[in-house]
Structure formats: C-alpha cells, structure tokens
C-alpha cells in the first residue's frame, strides 16, 4: 500500500504579472507565500508592473 503522507497537501505559488507571468516561489505555507508576494509587490510598484498573486498550485487564475 502506498504512503498517503502527501495526499491532501496544498501548495501555493507566487505568480508574477497578476497571475499571467512565471512562478517565482512555491510553498506549502500560505502565509510564507503571501509574505514573499509582498516583496515582489514592492518591486512591482517601483517598476510600474502588475503585482504578483498567490494561488493554489494547479489552479488557473
């Protein structure tokens, strides 16, 4: 019988350009992913680009 350790583990991705860009960070912790996204948001404000989003891995935005 296979191990079920990873069965219901969610992963969260920080995605640039409001969800249409590349994935820059993946974590199993949503608060960690959100804090990483804040760092990219500050950089996006300086560049005038769309801020990143945090989404569950495998879901479309």
Image (cartoon, rainbow, N blue to C red):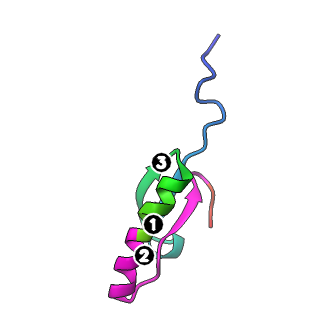
- Give the Cα separation between the discs numbered 2 and 1: 6 Å
Q: Are marks 2 and 1 in contact (CB under 8 Å)?
A: yes
Residue range of the region highlighted in magenta in the rendering = 39-58
SS of the residue at dot 1?
helix
> Is residue 24 placed above or below 19 in the rendered structure?
above
Q: Is residue 26 above or below residue 18?
A: above
Where does the image place residue 44, in percent across and percent down from the top left?
Answer: 38, 80
* C-alpha span from label 1 to label 3: 11 Å
Asked if residue 16 lies in the magenta stretch, the reply is no
- CA distance separating discs 2 and 3: 17 Å
The structure residue drawn at horizontal position 61% and vertical position 15%, both measured from the top left corner, is 2
Residue 16 locus on image (x, y percent): 44, 70
Classify residue 1 by image quadrant: top right
How many marks on residues? 3
For disc 3, the marked residue is 27
Which residue in the protein does label 1 denote?
A: 37
Q: Alpha-carbon neighbours of circle 3 within 10 Å: few (<14), some, or many (≥20)?
A: some
At x 42% / y 61%, what residue is drawn? 36
Mark 1–mark 3 CB contact (< 8 Å): no
Dot placed on the residue nearer the N-terminal end, 1 or 3: 3
Q: Is residue 41 above or below residue 46?
A: above
Residue 40 picture location, percent across and down: 39, 71
Could you tell me residue 55's position as x and y percent? Answer: 58, 60
Q: Is residue 17 left or right of residue 30?
A: left
- Of labels 2 and 3, earlier in sequence is 3
| Residue at image location 41% in from the left, 85% down from the top | 49
| Residue appearing at x 38%, y 78% in the figure | 42
Question: Could you tell whether 1 is left or right of 57 in the image?
Answer: right
SS at mark 3 in the image: strand
Is 46 rendered above or below residue 42? Answer: below
Q: Residue 41 got which mark?
A: 2
Question: Image quadrant for the C terminus?
Answer: bottom right
């Amino acid at each position: 019988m296979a191990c079920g350790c990873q069965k219901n583990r969610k992963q969260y991705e920080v995605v640039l350009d409001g969800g249409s860009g590349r994935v820059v960070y993946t974590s199993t912790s949503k608060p960690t992913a959100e804090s990483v996204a804040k760092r990219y948001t500050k950089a996006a404000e300086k560049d005038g680009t769309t801020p990143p989003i945090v989404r569950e891995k495998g879901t479309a935005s």
